[in-house]
Image (spheres, rainbow, N blue to C red):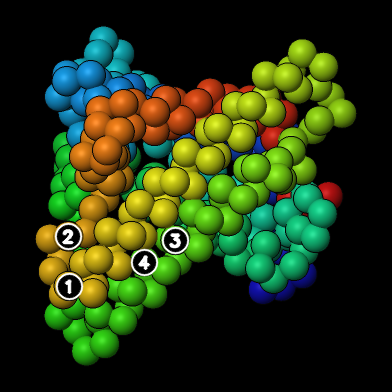
């Protein structure tokens, strides 16, 4: 990559409009989690409803007046999130030790995840509704297991989810997420609201990561792709724990909380990777 191209990319990544779009993306992410949490809460209360994943959330939005416009805005938001994370992968994150290779790789991984979210949302807009997260998880697991060494690859992916979930939970308890926020610009009242939202919301997201990883590992160990679960399946499994529907309701409340926390990030998150 030439110096002129790198300078052009850096200038674009540092532009205020790029930062604004990144914040729009965080709003889109918050809306998605609110919808998933709401669907999961309805399931816990016996309401059934859509799949508690991105697909179900988009179907819920699209069925409302003006819903297609919202879905388009969400697609644009996920595109902005992907570009923002790729910018952080190139220039580093605006947090302590944000230039470390591990931090850059984590940003690149998030960029890929958001790119998948953008592609899936765009496909939904054009009528390709696709499979639920559960169906996708089982199909991909079966495909991988059909390849030489695929079982070990599934176990590796499962381990990745488990490690990620554990890191997110520990980081939420240690309040590491505050390093990503402009806490100096917050009032005391804002801090009292944002901090518990971040702890509970990020903790719930970590628990879901652990659950998805555990089901993938079970599928690999038993050589049964049908044991794999996506987001919807992992959420619904909480209703089969000793806590029953209340267990699912508690996790759903955590997902809703992360949606609210995402709105706080849209206001106070450090988004300039070029500094």
- Residue 187 percent location from the top left of the image: 82, 16
Relative to residue 245, is residue 144 depicted above or below?
Answer: below
Q: Are marks 2 and 4 in contact (CB under 8 Å)?
A: no
For numbered disc 1, what is the local secondary structure? helix
**Number of numbered tags placed on the structure image:** 4
Q: Residue at 67%, 24% (x, y): give it.
A: 194
Q: Are marks 1 and 2 in contact (CB under 8 Å)?
A: yes
Q: Are marks 1 and 3 in contact (CB under 8 Å)?
A: no
Q: Which residue is mark 1?
A: 222
Q: Residues within 10 Å of mark 1 (few under 14, many from 20)?
A: few
Lateral position of residue 165 relative to residue 124, left or right: right
Q: Which residue is mark 4?
A: 158
Lateral position of residue 134 relative to residue 250, left or right: left
In the picture, the disc for residue 227 is 2
Q: In the rendered structure, which disc, 1 or 2, sits on the residue that comes first in sequence?
A: 1
CA gap between label 1 and label 2 equals 8 Å
Q: Nearer the viewer, mark 4 or mark 1?
A: 1
Q: Are marks 3 and 4 in contact (CB under 8 Å)?
A: yes
Q: Residue at 46%, 30% (x, y): give it.
A: 254
Q: Which residue is mark 3?
A: 162
- Residue 44 percent location from the top left of the image: 24, 25
Residue farthest to the right, as pictured:
184
The residue closer to the viewer here, 106 or 229, is 229
Relative to residue 157, is residue 243 depicted above or below?
Answer: above
CA gap between label 1 and label 3 equals 18 Å
Q: In the rendered structure, which disc, 2 or 4, sits on the residue that comes first in sequence?
A: 4
CA gap between label 2 and label 4 equals 12 Å
Q: Residues within 10 Å of mark 4 (few under 14, many from 20)?
A: many
């Amino acid at each position: 990559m030439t110096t002129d191209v790198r300078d052009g990319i850096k200038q674009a990544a540092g532009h205020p409009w790029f930062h604004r779009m990144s914040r729009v993306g965080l709003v889109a992410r918050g809306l998605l989690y609110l919808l998933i949490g709401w669907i999961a809460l309805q399931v816990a209360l016996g309401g059934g409803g859509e799949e508690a994943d991105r697909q179900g959330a988009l179907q819920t939005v699209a069925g409302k007046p003006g819903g297609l416009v919202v879905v388009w805005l969400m697609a644009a938001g996920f595109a902005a999130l992907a570009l923002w994370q790729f910018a952080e992968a190139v220039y580093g994150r605006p947090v302590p030790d944000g230039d470390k290779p591990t931090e850059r790789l984590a940003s690149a991984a998030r960029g890929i995840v958001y790119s998948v979210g953008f592609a899936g949302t765009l496909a939904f807009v054009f009528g390709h509704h696709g499979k639920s997260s559960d169906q996708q998880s089982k199909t991909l697991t079966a495909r991988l297991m059909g390849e030489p060494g695929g079982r070990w690859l599934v176990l590796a992916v499962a381990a990745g989810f488990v490690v990620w979930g554990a890191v997110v939970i520990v980081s939420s308890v240690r309040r590491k997420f505050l390093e990503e926020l402009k806490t100096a610009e917050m009032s005391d009242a804002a801090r009292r609201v944002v901090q518990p939202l971040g702890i509970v919301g990020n903790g719930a997201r970590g628990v879901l990561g652990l659950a998805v990883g555990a089901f993938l590992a079970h599928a690999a160990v038993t050589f049964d792709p049908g044991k794999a679960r996506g987001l919807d399946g992992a959420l619904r499994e909480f209703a089969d724990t000793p806590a029953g529907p209340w267990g699912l309701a508690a996790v759903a409340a955590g997902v809703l909380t992360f949606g609210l926390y995402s709105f706080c990030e849209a206001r106070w998150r450090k988004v300039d990777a070029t500094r």
